[in-house]
Amino acid sequence: MTDGETGRVFRLAYVPGVTPAKWVNVWTERMPDVPITLVAVPAAEVVALLRDGGADAGFVRLPVDRDGLSVIPLYVETTVVVVPKDHAVTAADEVALADLTDDEVLHPLDDAIEWAVRPGQPAFTRPPTTATAVELVAAGTGLLLVPQSLARLHHRRDVTYRPVPDAPQSQVALAWPKDATTDLVEDFIGIVRGRTVNSSRGRTPASPAEKPAQRQAQKSAKSGSGRRAVPAGRKRKGNRPR
């Protein structure tokens, strides 16, 4: 850490459903002098937050407007259908989109999935949030397709979910402003990408131990000796008597 970073705090934004704990734990171990602050933000607001400098980096759901941002896609989530516990689809381990043709499917305003064609029948309303949509599912007024992490986040005892393998999927990515790729951002990128503490891309790597032969060669070079190494198998000639 440079003197200019003393007292700095790394601000990490994340959208609902993303659990940054594993990366935060690594950061805390490697960067004990730079506290990390988590900023929970709705998916629709995270890009504006990053552009306005409200966070140094953030976990987003693709697609997003990438103008002015650097983005590293990380992982893709399974899409599931959230249904009341007594719904017919709960008899199966997986559900196809075709199985939902006759059902009303809710499409919240913060939908995390990009649909070319929306499945099922249009619901009577567009809920403002996924949380509200889950409440409507529990009331028996429609079904909901979401990334599995959001189904877990909004879990209720009166609803359940099943995977939908042929549905579009949501992808989580790390994003940050292109013109603010600081050393701290680079450090966090390294953690997310799984680089070790000794990685060549890190800023505080422990230099690998030099081999004894390398150290000896460097020592000889510094001493200014002009003697050439004797190839293996050849004997040195003794000094001639004067």
Image (tube, rainbow, N blue to C red):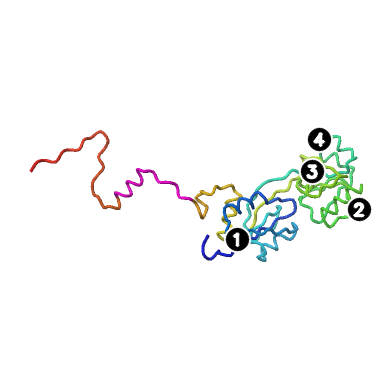
> Which residue type carries mark 2?
Phe
Q: Residue at x 62, y 57 (%)?
A: 70
Q: Which residue is mark 2?
A: 124
Q: Which residue is mark 3?
A: 80
Tell me if residue 165 is in the magenta stretch. Answer: no
Q: Earlier in the sequence, mark 4 or mark 2?
A: 4
Nearest the viewer among 153 and 53 is 153
> Which residue type carries mark 3?
Val
| Tag 1 and tag 2, C-beta contact below 8 Å | no
Query: Gap in Å between the C-alphas at discs 4 and 2?
Result: 28 Å
Query: Gap in Å between the C-alphas at discs 1 and 2?
Result: 42 Å
**Vertical side of 191 occupied by 88: above or below:** above
- Label 1 environment density (alpha carbons within 10 Å; few <14, some 14–19, many ≥20): some
Q: Of tags 3 and 2, which is closer to the observer?
A: 3
Q: Earlier in the sequence, mark 1 or mark 4?
A: 4
Q: Earlier in the sequence, mark 1 or mark 2?
A: 2
Q: Quadrant of residue 33?
A: bottom right
Query: Gap in Å between the C-alphas at discs 4 and 3?
Result: 11 Å
Query: Gap in Å between the C-alphas at discs 3 and 1?
Result: 34 Å
* Residue 192 x/y as whole percent: 61, 50
Q: Earlier in the sequence, mark 3 or mark 1?
A: 3
Main SS class of the magenta portion in the image: helix
* Residue 218 x/y as whole percent: 33, 49
Q: Earlier in the sequence, mark 4 or mark 3?
A: 3
> Which residue type carries mark 1?
Lys
Nearest the viewer among 8 and 171 is 8
Numbered label attached to residue 178: 1
Q: Which residue is mark 4?
A: 93
Q: Of tags 1 and 4, which is closer to the observer?
A: 4
In the rendered image, the residue lying farthest to the left is 242
* Residue 107 x/y as whole percent: 83, 52
Magenta span of residues: 206-220
